[in-house]
Amino acid sequence: MTSRPGQASLPPGSTIGVVGGGQLGRMLAFAAHQHGYRVAVLTGGEKDSPAGTVAEIEIAAGFDDEVAIGRLLAESDVITWEFENVDAGIADAAARAGLEVRPSGKIIATAQDRRAEKAALQAAGVAVAAWRSASSEAELETAVRELGLPVVAKAARFGYDGKGQARIERMDEVAGVWQHLGSQRLVVESVVEFERELSVIVARTRLGEVADHGVMENHHVDHILDSTVTPAHLSSQRMGEAGVIAARIAEEWDLVGVMCVEMFDAADGLIVNEVAPRPHNSGHCTIEAAPASQFEQQLRAVVGMPLGDGSCRPAAMVQLLGDLFLEGEPDWSRVFAPSSGLSAGSGLSAGNVHLHLYGKHEPRKGRKMGHMTAVGDDPDDLRDSLVALRQALTDR
Ligand code: AMP
C-alpha cells in the first residue's frame, strides 16, 4: 500500500495481527481500538486469552500451527508481536504473503537468542557484560576460567524472568549448573555490580522517527519485575546516555515498532543486559503518565503514523501476581478507597490509583494478573504507597 506524507499507510479499519495473546497484546488492542483499528491475535493455544477476549479475532492455536498462522496472515494487514519467544517462521510466512512484520523477523530471531543478541548489541556499539558462549561442560568451565568468578550462566534461547539461569560462585558448581540448565547452549556472563536496573522503551517508525518514555528504574523480586518508578534516580547526563543507547540500537537494528532495552547502571557506565522487541511491563505506567503510551507508540509505528509525545510525568507501577489470589479474590474496593488500607499521608488518593486486571482466569504463583499505577510528584512515595496498598488488598 502506498503512503502519502502525513497519512497513515494503513488506515483505520485495517487489522493489526498480533503474535501472542497476553496482557501486552490486550493493552495494544485497547490502543488500536481507540484509533479505529481491528485486532487479530494468535494466542499460542489459550482460549479466551487476555488479548483474545478484547480482539475482534482470537485464533487459539499454537505458534507452529500452519493453518492458524495462515488464518492470522489472511485476516491481518500488518503483523506485530507481544511475545517474542516463538518460532520466527511466522515472520517468513508473513513475508511470503507480502505482509509487513514490525518489528522484523530478524529482530525477533536476534532477541530470542542471547548469543545473537549480544553480538548484535556489540555490533551496534553498546556495552554489554563480558560474555562467552558454551555448548558443553568443558566449554562452560573454560568460559568461567576466562571470565573469572562469579558468572551468570543463561540458556541461550527462550529465557525470560530469570528462567533457565544460574549464578556460579565456585568452580565446583560448574558440573551441577550444566546439568541443571539441561545441557543446552549457554551464554555465560560476568556478574555486573550494578547500582540499579533500568529500562528504556523506544519506538521507531519506518521513516526513522524515534521517541522514548524516559528512563524506568526497575525492582525485581524472584527475577520478576515487582515495581517500576520513573524518572529513574540518575544524573541528567546518564539519563541522556540511556536514551542515546536505546535510540542507537533501534537505528542500528532498523526497528519499526517498540522495543525495551534493559540496562544495568554500573559504576563505570551503562551496560545493556537484554532487549525485548515489544512493549514491556516496565512501561505500563506510560498509559497514565505519558500523552502517548508504549502501546499507542507501537500502534502508530506499526501502521505508519507519526509517533506521539512519550514523555512521562513522575509515576510508579506495582505488579499484581497470582500470589495475591492464594486466599481468594483480593479486596479491590480498597484500591478505590486507598486511605482505608493505608496510614495517613501516604500520597495516594482514590483519584490517582489506576487498577489494571488482565482478565486471566487462573491465578498462579508468579503469574502476572494485573498492575496498579499512580502518577504524582514523588515516584518513590507513590511506589511505597502502592506497595502498601497491594499489601492491604489481602488483609482480611
Ligand atoms: P535476564 O533474564 O537476563 O533479564 O536476567 C534476570 C535478572 O538477573 C536481571 O534482571 C538481573 O537482576 C540479573 N542478572 C542478569 N544478568 C546479570 C549479570 N550479568 N550481572 C548481574 N546480574 C544479572
Image (cartoon, rainbow, N blue to C red):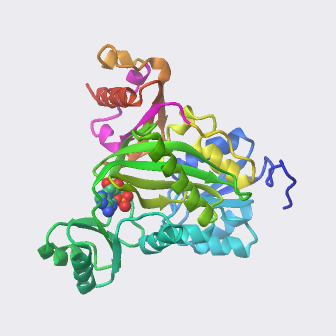
- Whole-percent x and y of residue 217? 40, 43
- Whole-percent x and y of residue 77? 75, 59
The magenta span reads: 312-336
Between residue 22 and residue 189, name the one nearer to us: 189
Residue 321 is one of the magenta-drawn residues: yes
In screen coordinates, is 29 left or right of 357? right
- Up/down of 34 relative to 275, above or below: above
- Whole-percent x and y of residue 242? 48, 50
Query: Which residue lies at the image location 84% right of the left edge and 61% below the top edge?
Result: 1
In screen coordinates, is 191 left or right of 283? left
Between residue 212 and residue 180, name the one nearer to us: 212
Q: Is residue 10 visible?
A: yes
Locate residue 291: give its quadrant. top right
Between residue 336 and residue 283, name the one nearer to us: 283
Query: Which residue lies at the image location 54% right of the left edge and 38% below the top edge?
Result: 286
Report the image quarter containing ligand 1.
Answer: bottom left
Q: Is residue 54 visible?
A: no
- Whole-percent x and y of residue 139? 27, 84
